């Protein structure tokens, strides 16, 4: 029986996000003097900055009297930026808007009263009618909407160079993680590294794709809402596969971020890399490589027909110094024109349903078709903020740091299960 994308996603958030206290929609920012807007993002590296630059250029063209202050903090899939942002919010010194992943990543800020309810802005702009239900569910907490999504990314992807895979004697990429391990052993015998990897967050990204591929979408979502037992035999077996996969990676000399890890599959230093589809912008735009010739992509093992999604969104912090300018920035992010300038350069699917699909080519055109296909099963990303709040996610990070050294799957599972209860 096919699994409904709407049912699956709502199940994933129902338990974790059901008891949020909302921020006041009536709050107003402080001093509006000075025509400027400070926007806090983590898009500063190649493959990311190009899309932001296009979005900002359109914002400036529409709002020539507003000075755009790009407060970008590089690296870490946003983890570096969030650490700095947390200090600013705690000190009641917010930017005018900040980037956040759609989903439970925003839960702690909502509970702390640090962000404004944007539901009225959604009604004014008619955005609800132009966003998919699964995405609206992700940005809705306790019946209110707190961020404006600008894109949709897919996390469960396996990247490779067709030339290198062929030269290594591999007929096609692995369809399951067991098949990956067979290939990895053969590659090791030839002196080749099967998988390149980067810092902690990329290891977490790999973890979620292995869990998804081994458990399937229902049990995967159950990990985040308490319905799948972390200490159960199927989860422990999946974690055992994860540690075996790590054993065929270059984790001992892990790259500093995702871009240099991806470089290794192009140079031949490694054969595969698991990463989201922001890789497209990096390889096609920054590296000027040709899709399906110089690089290619398939779903991560075991996840055909599944879209492990995330979405970059922007907020209106309570007390934003330049609230009117911040609202104009949000309008830009939510606009058809802005998204159609941003997403082709970012390698992402537009959040809006009414985008101009003629502007999207190659992999992105394929991704849009898959995202909108009603037969596609949609689940949310752990690493990129959809299914776990920041407290639990941080606890998982701590447990994962121990796991990649000890390979003690039962200890990891016990720690994650315990931290779930304490983070609710």
Image (tube, rainbow, N blue to C red):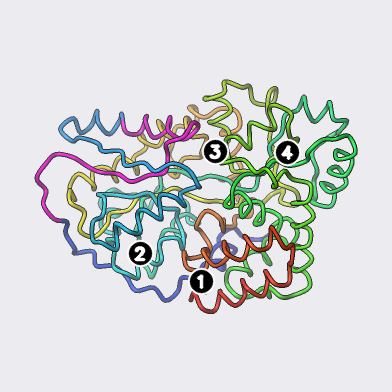
Nearer mark to the viewer, of 1 and 4: 4
Nearer mark to the viewer, of 1 and 3: 3
Camera sees residue 1: no
Label 1 to label 3: alpha-carbon separation: 28 Å
**Magenta residue check for 130:** no
Q: How many C-alpha atoms fall within 10 Å of the one at disc 1: few (<14), some, or many (≥20)? A: some
Q: Secondary structure at mark 2?
A: helix
Q: Is residue 89 above or below residue 49?
A: below
| Upstream in sequence: badge 2 or badge 1 | 1
Label 2 to label 1: alpha-carbon separation: 18 Å
Q: Which residue is mark 1?
A: 14
Q: Residue at x 22, y 42 (%)?
A: 37
Q: Which residue is mark 2?
A: 109
Camera sees residue 260: yes
Q: Which residues are magenta?
A: 30-56
Q: Which residue is mark 4?
A: 272
């Amino acid at each position: 029986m096919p699994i409904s994308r709407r049912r699956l996603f709502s199940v994933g958030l129902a338990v974790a996000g059901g008891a949020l206290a909302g921020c006041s929609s009536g709050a107003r920012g402080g001093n509006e003097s000075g025509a400027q807007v400070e926007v806090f993002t983590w898009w500063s590296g190649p493959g990311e900055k190009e899309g932001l630059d296009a979005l900002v250029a359109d914002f400036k063209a529409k709002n020539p009297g507003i000075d755009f202050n790009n407060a970008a903090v590089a690296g870490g899939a946003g983890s570096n930026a969030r650490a700095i942002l947390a200090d600013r919010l705690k000190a009641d010194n917010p930017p005018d808007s900040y980037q956040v992943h759609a989903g439970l990543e925003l839960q702690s800020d909502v509970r702390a009263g640090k962000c404004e309810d944007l539901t009225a802005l959604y009604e004014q702009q008619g955005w609800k009618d132009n966003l998919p239900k699964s995405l609206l569910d992700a940005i809705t907490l306790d019946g209110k909407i707190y961020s404006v999504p600008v894109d949709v990314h897919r996390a469960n992807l396996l990247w490779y160079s067709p030339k290198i895979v062929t030269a290594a004697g591999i007929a096609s990429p692995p369809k399951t993680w067991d098949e990956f391990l067979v290939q990895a052993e053969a590659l090791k015998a030839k002196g080749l590294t099967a998988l390149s990897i980067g810092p902690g967050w990329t290891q977490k990204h790999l973890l979620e794709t292995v869990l998804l591929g081994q458990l399937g979408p229902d049990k995967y979502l159950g990990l985040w809402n308490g319905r799948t037992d972390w200490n159960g035999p199927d989860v422990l077996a999946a974690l055992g596969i994860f540690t075996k996969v790590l054993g065929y990676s270059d984790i001992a000399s892990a790259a500093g971020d995702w871009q240099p890890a991806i470089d290794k599959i192009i140079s031949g230093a490694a054969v595969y890399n698991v990463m989201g589809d922001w890789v497209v912008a990096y390889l096609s735009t920054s590296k000027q490589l040709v899709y399906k010739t110089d690089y290619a992509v398939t779903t991560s093992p075991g996840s055909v027909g599944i879209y492990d999604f995330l979405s970059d969104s922007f907020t209106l912090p309570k007390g934003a110094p330049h609230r009117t300018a911040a609202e104009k920035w949000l309008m830009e992010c939510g606009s058809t024109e802005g998204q159609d300038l941003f997403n082709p350069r970012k390698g992402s699917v537009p959040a809006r349903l009414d985008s101009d699909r003629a502007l999207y080519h190659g992999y992105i055109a394929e991704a849009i078709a898959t995202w909108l296909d009603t037969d596609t099963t949609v689940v949310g990303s752990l690493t990129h903020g959809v299914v776990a709040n920041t407290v639990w996610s941080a606890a998982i990070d701590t447990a994962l740091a121990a796991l990649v050294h000890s390979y003690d799957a039962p200890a990891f599972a016990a720690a994650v299960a315990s931290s779930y209860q304490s983070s609710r």
